[in-house]
Amino acid sequence: MSRDTRLRITEIFYSLQGESRPAGLPTVFVRLTGCPLRCVYCDTAYAFHGGTPRQLEEVVQDVLNFGVPRVCVTGGEPLAQPACLQLLSQLSDRDLDVSLETSGALDLARVDERVTIVMDLKTPASGELDRNLWSNLACLKDGDQIKFVICDRADYEWARVQLEAHDLTGRFAVLFSPSWGQLEPRDLAEWILEDRLEVRCQVQLHKYLWGDAPGH
């Protein structure tokens, strides 16, 4: 079998979706190893290195064994591994509801159209503002989602400018998420209400349930 069909996997686990529009629903997560970014708020640095090499078919079967209709492919940055594209397509071929969580720093043009993309736009306080690949906005489709992790008021104001500059709320579901331990969710909620933004204020449900424990 070609090496191109192998993936380095940090973990495969079953939990509640903690973020994005289906938050709260039981979901299987496939966390791929490796990421070219170093966001200051990253909560999955344990996925930067290591992992276990697995054959693509084994990973798909592991997901199917859970008997859950939803699967989220995440990282790290999953698209840093070329075989991620094949994984997304093969999971979609099994009639699963497949989502991809991505930093938005790598090209999305070849992602299977059946996959729901949840793409970050990195804010100034993330430390990775220059890694935003703005051409990815043209690759998104109806049903895809854009997430801003907001660290402070300056991040919020920057994100608000992007909403208008790129007509984001008119095209996609937009999520504003307070950075865990940096910004009080209530503050973000009040800013959104004050400005009447058509965005979803999103907290990380899994953090409230299990803290920072891996595998949740």
Image: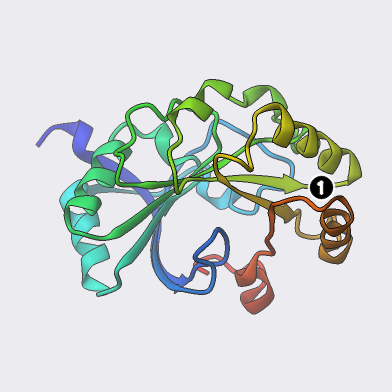
Of residue 86 and residue 187, the one placed in the foreground of this image is: 187
The residue at 54%/68% (across/down) is 23
Picture quadrant where residue 133 is located: top right
Say which residue label 1 marks.
151
Q: Position of residue 11 (x, y in %)?
A: 40, 59
Q: Residues within 10 Å of mark 1 (few under 14, many from 20)?
A: many
Q: Relative to 124, is 176 above or below?
A: below
Q: Determine whether, in the image, residue 154 is placed left or right of residue 73.
A: right
Q: Determine whether, in the image, residue 33 is placed left or right of residue 151.
A: left
Q: Determine whether, in the image, residue 73 is placed left or right of residue 83.
A: right
Q: Relative to 120, is 21 above or below?
A: below
Q: Position of residue 12 (x, y in %)?
A: 37, 62
The residue at 55%/39% (across/down) is 171
- Which residue is situated farthest in the bottom direction here? 209
Circle count: 1
The residue at 89%/55% (across/down) is 194
Of residue 141 and residue 68, the one placed in the foreground of this image is: 141
Q: Secondary structure at mark 1?
A: loop
Of residue 45 and residue 168, the one placed in the foreground of this image is: 168
Q: Determine whether, in the image, residue 42 is placed left or right of residue 18.
A: right
Q: Position of residue 148 (x, y in %)?
A: 68, 44
Q: Position of residue 86 (x, y in %)?
A: 23, 39
- The quadrant of the image that shows the N terminus is top left
Q: Relative to 137, is 69 above or below?
A: below
The image's colour scheme reads: rainbow
- Could you tell me the amino acid type at mark 1? Cys
Q: Relative to 98, is 170 above or below?
A: above
